Amino acid sequence: MSSPNPNFQLFPCTVADVPDMINIYMSAFADDYFARYTLPPDQIAPEEWQRWLTIRFTKVFSKPEYRVFKITDPNTGKACAFIRWAYPHVFTEEQKAQRKQEEKELERRKKEGTDDSWPRGANLEALDAKFSALDRIREETVDETNTYVAHLLAVHQDYQRRGLGPKLLKHTLDLADAEGRLVYIEATTAGYPVYAKLGFKEINAISVDLSKYGGKEPGVNRVMLREPQKVS
C-alpha cells in the first residue's frame, strides 16, 4: 500500500465542494464494472449526471449524521478524493418523524413513476437488485447508534495508488478505535484489498446477475466490518 504524500491534507467538505466531488466521482467510477450496467454511461446524458449528482451530494450536508471529508492536491488546492461517512447518531423524535415523512414521499413518487432518486437512463431493475440487498444487510448488521458507516469513497483516477483512500479512512478509523466502535463498509472489487489491509473482514456479499444487460459476469459487492483496534 502506497504511503500518501504528507502534503496531501484532509479537510471537511462543504456544499461549495460539490462540483469537485462530482468530478472525482465521475472519474473514480468510470471503469467500475458494476456501475457500467446499473448506471450505463451511454444511456445517461452529461447534463443528467450533473443534475442528479448535484442534488444527491448537496442533500448530504443537511443531514446531521453525515460527515464528508476531502483530500486536496497541495499543488492546485483542488479536491482529488473524498469520503462520506455516517457517524454514530441518535435521532431526535422530530428527526425520526421527518425521516418517516421522507420515506413515505419516496414511496409515493415510486408508485407514481415520478421518483428521481436515480438519473434518467439508469437501469432501475439492476439498481433495485443491488441496493435492496445491500440495504437489507446494512439494516440487519448496523447499530446506527454505535457504528461508523463509510458510505462512499472516491479517488480521482489521476491520484489513485497514492495511498489517499487509506488516508481518508484512517481519520475516522482512529476515532472508532479510540471509542471502541465498529466500522462498516460496502466494498467494490477495487476497494476490497485496500479495506482488508486496514483490518476490515468480509461478513457478507451480494451478487447480481448482469447477463441480461450484456454483462459477462455477476456484479459483486462485499460487505465488510472492522472491529475496533487496540490503541497504542
Image (cartoon, rainbow, N blue to C red):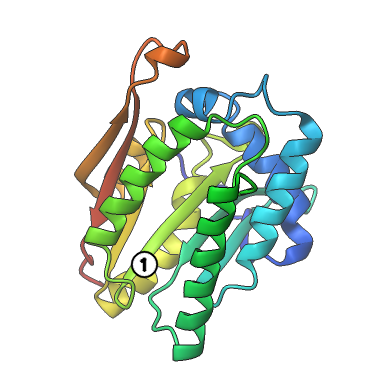
Q: Quadrant of residue 191?
A: top left
Quadrant of the drawing holding the C terminus: bottom left
Query: Furthest-front residue in view?
Result: 112
Secondary element type, mark 1: strand
Q: Is residue 47 above or below residue 225?
A: above
Left or right of 21: which side holds 216?
A: left
Q: Position of residue 157 (x, y in %)?
A: 62, 32
Residue 16 position (above or below residue 20): below
Q: Nearer the viewer, residue 140 or 97?
A: 97
- Image quarter where the N terminus lies is top left
Q: Residue 167: percent from the left, percent from the top?
A: 48, 54
Residue 78 in view (yes/no): no
Q: Position of residue 109 (x, y in %)?
A: 59, 54
* In the image, residue 18 above or below residue 220: below
Position of residue 45 in the picture relative to residue 227 (left or right): right
Position of residue 36 measured from the top left corner of the image (x, y, whole percent): 53, 23
Identity of the residue drawn at 44% across and 50% down: 166
Q: Which residue does the image show at 40% across and 79% down from the upper left? A: 89
Q: Residue furthest bottom?
A: 93
Query: Which residue is at the front of the view, 79 or 149?
Result: 149
At horizontal 44% and vertical 90% (from top left) the residue drawn is 93
Give the left or right position of residue 127, taking residue 29 as reference. left
Q: Give the number of callouts.
A: 1
Q: Is residue 210 above or below residue 10?
A: above
Image point 41% across, 31% down: which residue? 190
Q: Which residue is mark 1?
A: 148
Work out whether residue 12 or residue 29 is closer to the camera in this orientation and state it.
Answer: 29
In this view of the protein, can residue 206 be seen by the observer? Answer: yes
Snapshot quadrant of residue 211 = top left
Q: Amino acid at mark 1?
A: Tyr
**Callout 1: 10 Å neighbours few (<14), some, many (20+)?**
many
10 vs 20, nearest the viewer: 20
